[in-house]
Image: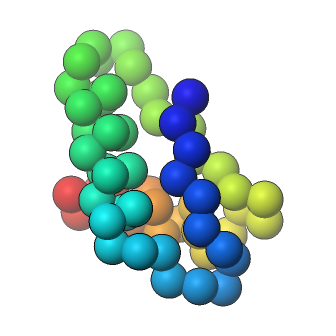
Amino acid sequence: VACFPFDDHNCPPIQLVISFCQSAYSWLKEDIENVVVVHCKAGKARTGLMISSLLVY
């Protein structure tokens, strides 16, 4: 389990986004069976931002 917290309705620090993408990508590359699950309290803006960032990483 990894945690990359930032406040809702705010932009995350770019280094936090990069760290998340590196961590998730590394985990996914490790084994084809690995999955990444992302959630936030509201399940809207923060989740979408992090998933979108990972997709373009």
Name the foreground residue: 52 vs 40.
Answer: 40
Picture residue at 21% right of the left edge, 57% below the top = 57
| The quarter of the displayed image where residue 42 is located | bottom right
| The quarter of the displayed image where residue 30 is located | top left
| The quarter of the displayed image where residue 27 is located | top left
Picture residue at 32% right of the left edge, 52% below the top = 19
In this view, 39 is above or below 12 = above
In the picture, measured across the screen, residue 43 lies left or right of residue 49, that is: right
Picture residue at 65% right of the left edge, 50% below the top = 39
Q: How many marks?
A: 0
Q: Position of residue 40 (x, y in %)?
A: 69, 57
In the picture, measured across the screen, residue 29 lies left or right of residue 13, that is: left
Q: Position of residue 17 (x, y in %)?
A: 37, 63
In the picture, measured across the screen, residue 36 lies left or right of residue 43, that is: left
Query: Can you name the residue that lies furthest to the right here?
Result: 41
Q: Position of residue 36 (x, y in %)?
A: 47, 34
Name the foreground residue: 23 vs 51.
Answer: 23
Q: Position of residue 3 (x, y in %)?
A: 57, 44
In the picture, measured across the screen, residue 11 lies left or right of residue 45, that is: left
Q: If the image is split into quadrants, where does the N terminus sit?
A: top right
Picture residue at 38% right of the left edge, 50% below the top = 20
In this view, 56 is above or below 2 = below
**Applied colour scheme:** rainbow
In this view, 24 is above or below 10 = above
